[in-house]
Image (cartoon, rainbow, N blue to C red):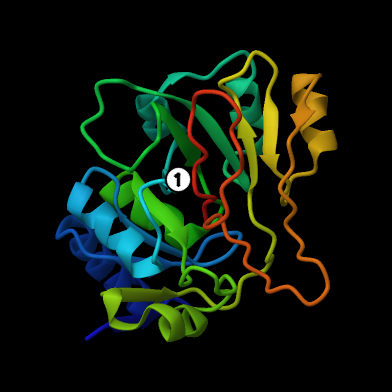
Amino acid sequence: MSRSYDCGDEEQRKTGIADAASTVRRGELVVLPTDTVYGVGADAFSPSAVAGLLAAKGRGRDMPPPVLVGSVRAAQALIEDLGNHGQDLIEEFWPGPLTIVCAATPSLSWDLGDTKGTVAVRMPMHPVALELLKDVGPMAVSSANASGNPAATTAAHAAEQLGDSVAVYLDGGPCADELPSTIIDLTYAVPRVLRSGAIPIERLRAVCGTVIAELKTTRPAPGEAKETSEPDAPADRGQGPAAPEPDA
């Protein structure tokens, strides 16, 4: 049976993060708050845990989850090449709602799915998420919703969709911003924005200069379901690298 912790209560937060860390190390799933929407996460270096995450959401290997980290150093260990602008973007927007797609370090022992040698990485600006990530290391994290459903903006909403497939729910209260992270692909000579989000393209251009917009809209047309989370909808990556599943 799932366990839930109110992270607005100091004792429950401490106990909950400790339980969540142990749970991740056992290869089970946890739901955590981020600065965008709630995410469901697993140990990025446990293939069985990542497979369980994709199964819980009803996703396939063709939509590999992004990876959340608790520090810039942790991200640097995952990335082989930041490109011409990666370091500047990290310094300007991390921690925060920017996901960068880069060539992954070839020696990494993990299996996130059909990544084609890339990794989508983000450092969130949320104290609960950062505390957990600094404890357990990089986590594969997708939005805490079943495929095709709206992204969860509360822990209760996530529990309604994912139920007992998740062992621990960390309740950080309602999300302050329902916009997903902006995704920028740095594997090209000229950076490409794959999905618009919380960081406008104008701010990216202020750092990078030229940026190509291959935008996936974050706002549904009237009458369509809203499913934004760094989660589900991949963008067409065009050449080689596979589109990562947007992150939470």
Q: Name the spot of residue 60 as percent of width and height, x first.
A: 37, 54
**45, 237: nearer the viewer:** 237
Q: Residue sitting at 57 percent across and 15 percent down?
A: 83
Residue 28 lies in what quarter of the image? bottom left
**127, 200: nearer the viewer:** 200
Q: Name the spot of residue 69 as percent of width and height, x first.
A: 42, 43
Q: Residue sitting at 28 percent across and 75 percent down?
A: 165
Q: Name the spot of residue 112 as percent of width and height, x first.
A: 32, 43
Please identify the quadrant where the N terminus is shown: bottom left
Q: Which residue is mark 1?
A: 66
Look at the picture and state if 87 lies above or below 153. above
Q: Is residue 62 left or right of residue 83?
A: left
Q: Residue sitting at 61 percent across and 43 percent down?
A: 235
Amino acid type assigned to the residue bearing label 1 in the image = Pro
Q: Residue sitting at 65 percent across and 13 percent down?
A: 189
Residue 153 lies in what quarter of the image? bottom right
Looking at the image, the residue that sits furthest to the left is 26
